[in-house]
Amino acid sequence: MTAFIALLRAVNVGGRGKLAATDLKAACEAAGFSGVRTYIQSGNAVFATQLQEDAARSRLKQALRAMTGQDFELFLRAHAELRQMLAAAPPGGDPARSIIYVFQAPPDHAMLETMVAPDGETVSITGRAIHVYYPTGTGRSRLKLKGLNEGTGRNLNTLRKLSVMAAECEGDET
């Protein structure tokens, strides 16, 4: 069994993509996953399955569509990959201002060539993720990075909590 972290894009943000955490949990369970837990109302779940990533994503998308009638953009990360993303995050700084954006495929490093970071934001690409540190916070940032909106982002505090939950989920499966 592999523990996966599910990150849904644009859930309960600005009145769009409404999905209660209880409904997300129910969809994960309907998809046949075990050890399902959710974290805060922004489309985060942890579960275990024997399926590979693509099959698990497809099954969860189908369960969500059957339950809600909506198509949610869904990103999955195996716990091992999430641990690698967290380890690659630059040390220091406020973890609430450190956002990791995940993508379906590795982002093109060429996107950094056109980046505008007037507030001192730092950006790095690792695997299928982009790490951005916002020294002034995300709400004040004037960062321009083409393609960033194709992924979904979570701050380090949230991702660390999801990693702990995934470790517990893996422990439940042994």
Image (cartoon, rainbow, N blue to C red):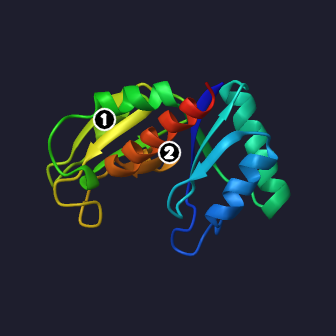
Query: Residue 24 vs residue 150: left or right?
Result: right
Residue 158: percent from the left, percent from the top? 39, 51
Residue 128 seen in the figure = no
Query: Residue 140 vs residue 19: left or right?
Result: left
State whether residue 31 is above or below residue 79. Answer: below
- Which quadrant would the C terminus be assigned to in this image? top right
Residue 94: percent from the left, percent from the top? 19, 52
Which residue appears at 57% of the width and 75% of the height?
Answer: 15
Element type at marker 1?
helix
Which residue appears at 24% of the width and 48% of the height?
Answer: 116
Q: Which mark is residue 151?
A: 2
Residue 52: percent from the left, percent from the top? 69, 24
Name the amino acid, label 2.
Answer: Gly
Name the amino acid, label 1.
Answer: Leu
Which residue appears at 20% of the width and 48% of the height?
Answer: 121
Which residue appears at 75% of the width and 53% of the height?
Answer: 27
Q: Residues within 10 Å of mark 2 (few under 14, many from 20)?
A: many
- Which quadrant would the N terminus be assigned to in this image? top right
Of the numbered discs 1 and 2, the one sitting upstream in the chain is 1
Q: Which residue lies under the disc numbered 1?
A: 112
Element type at marker 2?
loop
State whether residue 51 is above or below residue 98. Answer: above
Residue 87 seen in the figure = yes
